[in-house]
């Protein structure tokens, strides 16, 4: 084998740590960004929180309307393509670590121009944000998340009731164990035998004793409020609630007129649940031995029961949505204008620690201290880039939101029926950004509007053809379907085919299958289940 030297010219794309961080911050939600900021504050001593207003960066909104050069657009396109590939193939660590360079020669260096001096952009950013607070009941410290945390869980509610029962230590422990084994809906998914075997293993005698204690504890659990808790299936859950109504009717004279329907409902719940789901009245009349009118009354009674007893105890904190941008209306009617601004409550207020940065500037180490000085200088540059990337994230969100509001102005004036078809490519072309960048910006970012709070992706939708040759937004078509169904007769609900014909009368070409797809997406039952009994 002969050895020799040769020259080769090649090109490869390497994402710098700054660009990697910018892309990653752009796709984070508000909560994830908050966690990222907290982690960076813990790790980087040059970064601190501040409440003062910072100057704008030169690449911020002041440059928002500057035309994008073709070279920059091509570079962004290549970077986004590479970022998508790296994101799909990298292994996600627990701390969501940064993407490694694509080339082994490209080390992660945050060094800028090699200077440790304070730059004009070293001051804080996001300082106009005020601490999040709501003046609820005169308490300025109270907010929605704190109120959500104080909500009583299903397990706590049941444990409090169990305290009033006089039980032996074994039965009390068994009841506590069953309560903790319930799912969020209040059902006991595991069998008593499997729960006992999970505790006792292969000891058959101990398993038998545990099953006995669990059986006693289950009857006690099912007697607690809310009615239906501890059921092992839908039929048992409905039966428990109906039995509670029977017990109530024995002491409350006002409930006695409905007792006949309750008894028939108990017989219905003893039958296969698919008959009830199909509302097969004729078959249920035969099986239950009751009149047609009584069976219909019983089905209506079952429809008013709670199929998920633990639903009202579910933690509501996860349903809280904090908008990233706010849309403010000025003027009314044809003179209405909509202004978009960032929600300052979600903007982190960060700045470079002046004391530490000045100390590093004045103490330029040499000799043995050179390595430590270089490491600290790199951390300082990392803090600067983190502040810049966060600012750029919010600037991009604001630019995209402004473009969306401009394109969907009819929605903000008239509601979802006036939504226009819109795809990511249109916003990307208008702003001179890559389509994947728009996708990242619109994911898990929310906009507060006069009609409610929506994810930015809500304003994008495909179009359906119309008789006039234009397009109607799929969101508007869904709203129209919902409007048709809300105005239908309960005795003769509209079928999917009828809705399709009604849309054609409005000039919208929408097939029956598409109507069914949109209806299911709206969680609206088919016509057979919407018909009044």
Image: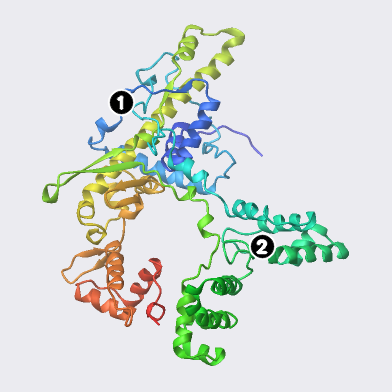
Residue 219 position, x and y percent, is: 69, 67
Quadrant into which the C terminus falls: bottom left
Are the two marked residues, 2 and 1, in contact with CB atoms closer than 8 angstroms? no
Picture layout, residue 251 above or below residue 328: below
How crowded is the residue under tag 2: few (<14 C-alpha within 10 Å), some, or many (20+)? many
Residue drawn 44% across the image and 31% down it:
18
Q: Secondary structure at mark 1?
A: loop
Residue 184 position, x and y percent, is: 57, 58
Q: Is residue 28 visible?
A: no
On the rendered structure, is 326 left or right of 185?
Answer: left
The answer to which of 455 and 407 lies nearer the viewer is 455
Picture layout, residue 440 above or below residue 255: above
Read off the residue under disc 1.
56
On the rendered structure, is 362 left or right of 138?
Answer: right
Specify how the rendered protein is coloured: rainbow
Residue 104 position, x and y percent, is: 56, 34
Picture layout, residue 219 above or below residue 365: below
The answer to which of 323 and 238 lies nearer the viewer is 238
Residue 14 position, x and y percent, is: 47, 36
Marks 2 and 1, how far apart at CA: 61 Å
Residue drawn 26% across the image and 59% down it:
416
Read off the residue under disc 2.
221
The answer to which of 63 and 233 lies nearer the viewer is 233
């Amino acid at each position: 084998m002969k050895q020799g030297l040769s020259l080769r010219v090649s090109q490869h794309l390497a994402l710098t740590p700054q660009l990697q961080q910018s892309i990653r911050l752009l796709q984070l939600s508000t909560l994830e960004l908050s966690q990222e900021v907290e982690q960076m504050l813990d790790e980087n001593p040059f970064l601190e929180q501040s409440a003062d207003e910072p100057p704008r960066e030169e690449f911020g909104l002041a440059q928002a309307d500057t035309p994008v050069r073709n070279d920059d657009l091509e570079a962004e396109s290549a970077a986004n393509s590479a970022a998508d590939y790296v994101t799909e193939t990298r292994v996600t660590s627990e701390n969501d670590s940064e993407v490694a360079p694509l080339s082994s020669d490209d080390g992660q260096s945050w060094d800028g121009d090699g200077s440790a001096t304070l730059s004009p952009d070293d001051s804080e950013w996001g300082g106009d944000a005020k601490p999040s607070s709501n003046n609820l009941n005169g308490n300025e410290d109270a907010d929605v998340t704190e109120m959500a945390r104080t909500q009583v869980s299903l397990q706590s509610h049941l444990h409090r009731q169990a305290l009033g029962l006089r039980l032996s230590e074994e039965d009390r422990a068994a009841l506590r164990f069953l309560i903790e084994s319930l799912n969020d809906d209040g059902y006991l998914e595991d069998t008593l035998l499997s729960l006992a075997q999970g505790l006792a293993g292969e000891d058959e005698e101990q398993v038998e004793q545990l099953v006995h204690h669990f059986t006693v504890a289950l009857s006690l659990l099912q007697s607690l409020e809310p009615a239906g808790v501890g059921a092992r299936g839908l039929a048992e859950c409905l039966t428990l609630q109906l039995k509670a109504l029977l017990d109530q009717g024995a002491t409350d004279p006002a409930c006695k007129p409905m007792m006949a329907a309750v008894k028939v409902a108990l017989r219905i719940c003893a039958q296969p649940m698919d008959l009830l789901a199909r509302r097969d009245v004729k078959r249920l009349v035969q099986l239950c031995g009751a009149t047609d009118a009584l069976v219909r009354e019983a089905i209506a009674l079952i429809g008013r029961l709670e199929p998920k007893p633990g639903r009202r105890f579910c933690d509501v904190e996860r349903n809280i949505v904090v908008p990233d941008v706010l849309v403010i209306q000025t003027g009314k009617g044809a003179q209405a204008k909509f202004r978009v601004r960032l929600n300052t409550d979600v903007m982190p207020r960060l700045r470079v620690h002046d004391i530490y940065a000045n100390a590093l500037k004045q103490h330029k180490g040499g000799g043995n201290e050179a390595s430590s000085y270089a490491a600290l200088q790199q951390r300082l540059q990392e803090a600067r880039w983190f502040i810049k990337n966060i600012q750029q994230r919010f600037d991009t969100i604001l630019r995209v939101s402004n473009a969306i509001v401009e394109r969907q102005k009819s929605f903000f004036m008239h509601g979802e029926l006036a939504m226009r078809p819109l795809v990511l490519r249109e916003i990307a072309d208008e702003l001179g950004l890559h389509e994947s960048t728009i996708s990242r910006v619109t994911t898990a970012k929310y906009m507060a509007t006069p009609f409610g709070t929506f994810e930015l992706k809500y304003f994008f939708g495909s179009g359906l053809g119309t008789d006039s040759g234009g397009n109607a937004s799929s969101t508007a078509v869904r709203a129209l379907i919902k409007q048709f169904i809300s105005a239908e007769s309960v005795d003769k609900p509209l079928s999917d085919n009828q809705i399709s014909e009604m849309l054609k009368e409005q000039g919208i070409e929408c097939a029956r299958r598409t109507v069914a797809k949109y209806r299911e997406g709206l969680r609206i039952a088919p016509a057979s289940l919407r018909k009044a009994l």
